[in-house]
Image (cartoon, coloured by chain):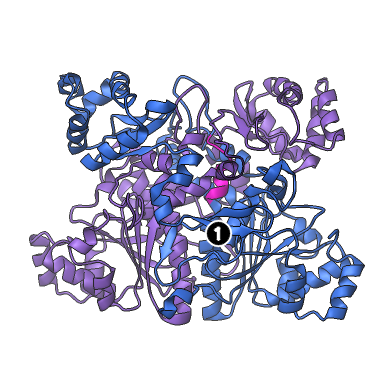
Chain colours: A purple, B blue
Amino acid sequence: MEQPLSDIRVLDLTDDKGLLCGRMLADMGADVIKIEKPGGDTVRNTPPFYHDIPDPEKSLFWFAYSLNKRGITLAIDSEDGKAILRDLVRKADILVESFPVGYLKKIGLDYAALKKVNPNLIMASISPFGQTGPYKKFKASDIVGMAMGGYLYLCGDPEKPPVRISVPQAYLHAAAEAAAAVMIALAYRDSSGEGQYIDVSMQQSVVMNTFQAVPFWLIDKKVLERAGPFRVGLSAGTRQRQTWPCKNGQINFVIYGAWGATYDILVQWLEENGINTEDLKRLKADNWDVFNMSQERWEKVEKPIGEFFLKYTKEELSEGGMKRGIPLCPVAAPSEVVNSAQLAATGFWMNVEHNELGTSIKYPGFCYKFSETPCKVWRRAPLIGEHNMEIYHNELGLSVKQIISLKETGVI
Amino acid sequence: MKKATHKQALKGLKVLDFTWVVAGPISTKYLGDYGATVIKIESREHPDFLRTSGPFKDHKADPNGTGYFAFFNANKFSMLLKLNHPQGLLIAKKLISWADIVVENYVPGTLEKLGLDYEHMKAINQDIIMISASGQGQIGPYARVPIGGNWLSALTGFFWFSGWPDSGVSQPYGAYSDLISPRFMIVAILAALRYRQKTGKGQYIDFSQFESGIQFLSPAMLDWTANSRDGERIGNAAASSAPHGVFPCLEGRWCALSVSTEDEWTAFCKVIGGARWTKEVKYASLWNRKQNEDELNKLVAQWTIRHTPEQVMLLMQKAGVPAGVVESTKDLCEDPQLKFRNHFWTLDHPVIGPYAHLGQASILKETPAKPRMPAPCLGEHTEYVCRKLLNISDKEFVEYLNGGAFGVL
């Protein structure tokens, strides 16, 4: 066995709500077949596009989250389509879907029906609020998801409305959650032989992003509010600056991390720049009594640090800081992330060939290095119906004549 | 009662947990929630950062009274161990023999210094699986800089995409990328476990939180590598929706809503009573609405401000328009959907009392996650682990205790 999931086949019937799940399983070696509607899924219209050409074969969202999958087209709402899907399910281990709640039941392809075809099937459904409960029929876009998961409330400046991360996040949390849940169900199937149904809620997947905010409500009946560039929640009632202006942008630095050692290095660096560090030293001498520290005192400590940061660019600060062992991080744009010296050293980025585009594109790599089973790029994201012949003809044994007829009738 | 209710997916799995703060402990909580035996190694001299972070019961800075730690640490044993003490190290080696999986997220190099890196562990337990989850990976020029999710979220680009076009960044709350890592870690851990079951081979996994965070910005990264575009702050706007954003409601609260399709626009107009402006040409298509978005948002706000966010949500959802309360933590704790799905587990915590611990986001029908134990007090299970799990004799245990193997008790 080459990779942990080399013997596993996954049917991926998701859209933007779940593509990452199949991608994560494919990276572990699973044979993931993305099933799209004939003509291609609408998720292919998700921007940004390669060279800004809005073409279903050029969505960078699709490229990123369908990497390493094969792709076929199938109208699962037609009778022939259903028969073919059941055939595929018979030979699959896992099915992941993100249709509106109730849709698969309506067309006779819910878990109860598919289990009859494959008794050991693991099936995961990703939905906005889960398959049960008073909100089960509610719709949610990314911003609604981040709002109802409690995260949006905490993001933004106090004097302005809450503001989201504008690259959609909510369903990525849900899709990653589905991948984790599928792996747990697979561990159980490996030991017991039993498959099962998994009901993933996007809202619930987002909730844990609120960190200690829920505890502050539970313990102190205090609602933490958004605080812009400041951290709140270290102790009630005070705030500490985290995002600092510097010469050419912004830099992130947390005075009280868990690590006193880096503090001394910073103090020394400030002194080398002729900055008075008396208040910083006193804080350390007082044994970091951060919970009882007044806001006034925090600001006294912050003032010289703020002055220091304004003297330098974010590149000077982050490189100078990292070299000294202090985590000083630029508020980085994608270009800066792509040019990161650290990521170059870990060999993170990888080139993926796109022959149809006559080029290769640099992709984010894998976040894990396995000593025995390294992740690999098997293939770029599939074109529309790219593996129809391979799967329908070579693997399911449909004749060329049958396939032509299915194409003509709009089934594939 | 069906026996199904007693099944646990990961029962029997033995996890040695050298993690702290947020990302690591959440990953081991996953394993514990689904039935694994998790032993969290702690020390009073170097407590888990969360044990020193509020909110505290009765405002007393007690490592056992913090609601933050409790929220994220149900279903684990806590064991005190002084790793830089010869007898402590000896017990650590017994734990390594016992374990299937070691999870750690110390600053890279820390375990190596203690003689507890993967090579040493492998010498003790040939097929051990070990995952080191660090900020920026185990190799590279900045690997050994101590770093956490706050910094990494800036470094990864999340700050860059948060805020308004006319002002600086509005950083996303907390240590955002800390909450991206755990699910990737679970996939990696269970993949390695499966590989071991099939082949007998353990392995080492070098996991980078920086790199896992980037997975959530992949399209934006490709926008740079393919199109040389860095993206920009667009507030709450979205390319193919209008109106789209959060809108002010009664009580100083907010409701998020988004209108993308023409059907949704028609439904939206109907819900707000078909106001005259909704029929104007400048709002007649998505393109037109995007062109006049600022004005549109003001008009929408004039309607939402007369309602509670719950009213806006229910009216819009009934008509098929995505909308939802911008929930505060109070709202979350009272959310009927989260209650229905038992998202928070109330467990009787020895210091805090009945307390809601974080539950799981998925329901596995046959093997659901289960609250078994509240978050442990510091070192609560030291003796239990030694005697029951490691079969250390009473005499030996007392020797270790007196010798200082567990550090300050």
Q: What chain letter is assigned to the residue under label 1?
A: B
Snapshot quadrant of residue A230: top right
The picture places residue B96, in percent across and down from the top left corner, at 72, 72
Asked if residue A396 is positioned above or below residue A176 in the image, the reply reads below
**Residue at left offset 65%, top offset 44%:** B148
Q: Is residue B177 magenta?
A: yes
Q: Residue at x 67, y 30 (%)?
A: A238
Report whether B323 appears left or right of A166.
left
Q: Nearer the viewer, residue B154 or A256?
A: A256
Q: Quadrant of the C terminus of chain A?
A: bottom left
Residue A137 x/y as whole percent: 27, 50
Placement of B334 over or under B29, stated as above or below: above
Left or right for A131, reference B189 = left
Density class for disc 1 (Cα within 10 Å; few <14, some 14-19, many ≥20) is many
Q: Amino acid at mark 1?
A: Met
Which one is in front, B260 or B2? B2
Q: Which residues are magenta?
A: B172-180
**Callout 1: SS:** helix
> Which residue is drawn at the image coordinates 28% and 37% (left, top)?
A53
Q: Nearer the viewer, residue A292 or A387?
A: A292
x, y (%) of residue A349? 52, 49
Residue B363 appears in the picture as rendered: yes
Residue A335 left/right relative to A243: left
Rendered residue at 78%/58% (across/down) = B43
For the question of whether residue A339 can be seen, the reply is: no
| Viewer-side residue, B219 vs B399 | B399
Q: From the viewer's perspective, is residue B317 above or below residue B87?
A: above
User: In the rendered structure, does residue B199 fall within the stretch colored magenta?
Assistant: no
The residue under label 1 is B185
Residue B402's x, y, as percent? Answer: 91, 68
